[in-house]
Image (cartoon, rainbow, N blue to C red):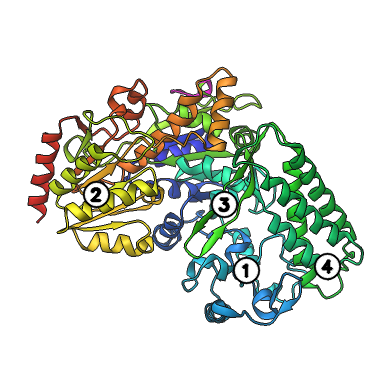
Amino acid sequence: MAEAVGESLAGGDHLLVQAGTGTGKSLAYLVPSLLHDSRVVVATATLALQHQLVERDLPRLVEAVGDLPGVDASYAVLKGRSNYACLHRIREGVPDDQGVLIEAPVGSMATKVLELRAWAEEEVESKGSGERDKAPRHTDREWRQVSVSHRECLGAAKCPFGAECFAELAREEAQRSHLIVTNHSLLAIDAIEGVPMIPDYDAVVIDEAHELTSRITQAATDELLPADVDRAAKRSQRHVEGDQAMDLGDAGDALRVAMGEMDPGRIDQPPEALRDALVLVRDAARSCLSAYPKSDSSAEADAGMTQAKGSVQELFATADRMARFSEADVLWLAEGASGGQSRIPPRLCVAPLQVWGPMRDKLLTDKVVVFTSATLRLGGDFSTVATSFGLKATELVLDGPPVARTDDVLPWRGLDVGSPFDYGRQAILYVAKHLPPPGRDGLGKAQLDEIVELVDAAGGRTLGLFSSRRAAETAAEEVRVRLPHLTTLAQGDAQLPELAKQFVEDPYTCLFGTLSLWQGLDVPGDTCQLVLIDRIPFPRPDDPLMSARQRAADNAGGNGFMQVAATHAALLLAQGSGRLIRTTEDKGVVAVLDPRLVTARYGRFLSASLPPMWTTTDPDVVRKALTRLAAGSA
């Protein structure tokens, strides 16, 4: 892998590398990246991998090669501005809805925010990074009291604390470094949206690349709530002398009425009231921006005005995008929801219909890109994932010398470096062919009986991956009642790190949950010997974005189901199955309770995307295997 990455960086071909857990893939791309003659950006999807690179892999690598002549082993971490504490907000106060700076937080947040402020000052003294990941435990709402977005930032030249600014210091360090570690979202903003966030570079390594298209989609998704309009209008009243702020508030009322008359879901033909309301918000926001006094760069910055104006600018950009009703975007009304003590109100959302076009035009054409993940070969080859990135199947170079890049041809290669695991001996894939296909009503008696029998045979040691929170909770309750000697945890019973800790420490434990467990849990050893998957994780039929992408693929002459729904399911199945075998000593069973994996025509594509486990549909064989494993682990 290291040789292939080095050849790609030197020759200019793009590269897709599938490298299973335990292959050492981070070192395999870090070594050639440090040896490359110009700056390389490494982008990850998760904080866990970012920490691994910065806290473990890179320090060891620098210690090993840092003294070699001609090797620039400098590196830096770079994140979006809101990931760093803002000293101006901490020392001068937080604007309220009117845009007036208040000296200290009030209410239940006060203690935590004061703790965050004290931590930030300690970071200044110790020359720390001021990164959110290193702060005391906090909520999103509490962090917003000590941070700002890029629109709210005064800028280093205007801010009285610019010389100490954590975000600016991180940017300066990145400017001096040969290798920059960042995340998918910041890479997308820099390369695809064209907002300069990262110092000049010509090569990118994208780890956890199976997440890339969804992270780019998230970064390019905007939301609009009437409450956002109200807040921006109130904050503007202090700074705008005319009626423009009141007009903006009236536009928010019109948007609220228009949204109240609509049903949740994708908006293909927007009602006239919504069209008019979005135009009204856009035009009112533009007028309000024009009414703000022109700032004097030599004068002391007015933080309240800068941040109030930033909220209106953001509002204008979102309303303007939505009001265009572009065919390149998908617009939908997201349903409100209640969770615990908080309530999420209905909101308008807009996201790009596809991201492969911008990725090809703005990233792949200008840079050399190495994509790597444990899951890149779907259905047995790389073409499905490569196409989602903006590469073409016809551009695949099978062997031979490099192919010249042109504006129309972007050559790429695929490499599967395999795995240190012997899946045929270490893992069984069990498909419950005898069960009825899953229905819309959730888990039935047959599925629940199967779950209980499998968990009983395994003696706990079970990670249950479910398609919905309701299914996970139903299964957990059934196991608690029928197998009371085991400990059964469900996502939501406590914070995920706490649940994972308990799952690891007690082998007689089951942990049932949804999407965050499919990809984010690493539990090697006897803790997990059974991974249960209740159904093939196709996207919901009413998912506005996925259904729009599927329809667009059909209209373009393709197979929307296979290109969108089946590809989505294959990625998740591969990631979920990957929770089982994490070391060369692990053994166990992946049990899929959806017979369509072996009975449906698309089942072969999905199965070819999974690790090469020994496969059976015989429940007796699996229960005996689980019983033997449990006895050997006891």
- In front of the other: label 3 or label 1? 3
- Dividing the picture into quadrants, the one containing residue 4 is top left
Q: Which mark is residue 147?
A: 1
Task: Looking at the image, tell me whether mark 4 or mark 1 is earlier in sequence order.
Answer: 1
Using the image, determine if residue 101 lies above or below residue 12: below
Number of other residues with Cα within 10 Å of mark 1, as a class: few under 14, some 14 to 19, many 20 or more: many
| Dots 1, 2 in contact, CB < 8 A | no
- Decide if residue 499 is on the left or right side of residue 456: right
Residue 30 seen from this side: yes
Q: Which residue is mark 3?
A: 336
Q: Which mark is residue 237?
A: 4
- In front of the other: label 4 or label 2? 4
Task: Looking at the image, tell me whether mark 2 or mark 3 is earlier in sequence order.
Answer: 3
Residue type at mark 2? Thr
Looking at the image, the residue that sits furthest to the right is 242
Number of other residues with Cα within 10 Å of mark 3, as a class: few under 14, some 14 to 19, many 20 or more: few
Task: Looking at the image, tell me whether mark 3 or mark 1 is earlier in sequence order.
Answer: 1
Element type where label 1 sits in the image: loop
